[in-house]
Image (spheres, rainbow, N blue to C red):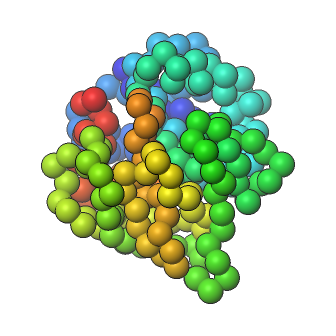
Amino acid sequence: MIAILDYGAGNLRSVENALAELGCEYQLVRNAEGLSRAKKVILPGVGHFGHMLRSLEAMAVRQPLFERIRAGAPFLGICLGLQALFERSEEAPDVAGFGLIPGEVRRFPETARVPQMGWNQLEALRPARLLEGAPKGAYVYFAHSYYAPVTEATAAVSIYAEPYTALLEKDNIYGVQFHPEKSGPVGLRILKNFVEL
């Protein structure tokens, strides 16, 4: 069973629709018990970095989520869910991220129009399991004002003012800054690859 972690915000319906189209079983999860049964976990995120992390703490699911990840359950963070994997964000300097990937999430420079909303191209830096079967240089849909740095975990970048992490893979941890559930056939392929891990 794939758990979609529902912290009270996020575009859950689109993610649910995409998973339903792929014919896979999923369940909205709001507590530690639900996480403990999950074979895979998806954390879709929209909104504010601090609000999401505080919500996960208030729901007492942050530590159980870490335990599932440490146990080897594949984890997919979408948009803000990817940013949460990092140590911190300029959006909420007083709130700690998961710290599973080193680095700080930053706001796009003032010279760039924010948020970046719309389609942007993926540039693969290395082979990635999530990109298997996806066309080279595919376009996917983004909606964000903050971006994650390029790190050793980065598998693909996009460029908006500067290169940033668009897709990362590290062991059983996966993250996408874009919204695969809104990215047409390419996005469905990426979700399918996660489902079939």
Q: Position of residue 50 (x, y in %)?
A: 74, 48
Indicate whether 25 appears above or below 89.
above
Q: Is the residue 163 above or below the residue 191 in the image?
A: below
Q: Is residue 25 left or right of residue 70?
A: left
Left or right, 77 with respect to 74, comes to: right
* Side (left or right) of 125 relative to 13: left
Q: Can residue 146 be seen by looking at this rendering?
A: yes
Q: Which residue is located at x 58 percent, y 82 percent? A: 112
Quadrant the N terminus occupies: top left
Q: Position of residue 36 (x, y in %)?
A: 52, 13
Query: At x 61% / y 64%, what residue is drawn?
Result: 146
- Residue 148's quadrant in the figure? bottom right
Q: Is residue 94 above or below residue 105?
A: above
Q: Of all residues shown, which one is farthest toward the front? A: 152
**In the depicted structure, whether residue 56 falls above or below residue 91:** above
Question: Residue at horizontal 41%, vertical 67%?
Answer: 158
Q: Quadrant of residue 137?
A: bottom left
Please state the horizontal and vertical placement of residue 90, each as a whole percent of the image: 73, 60
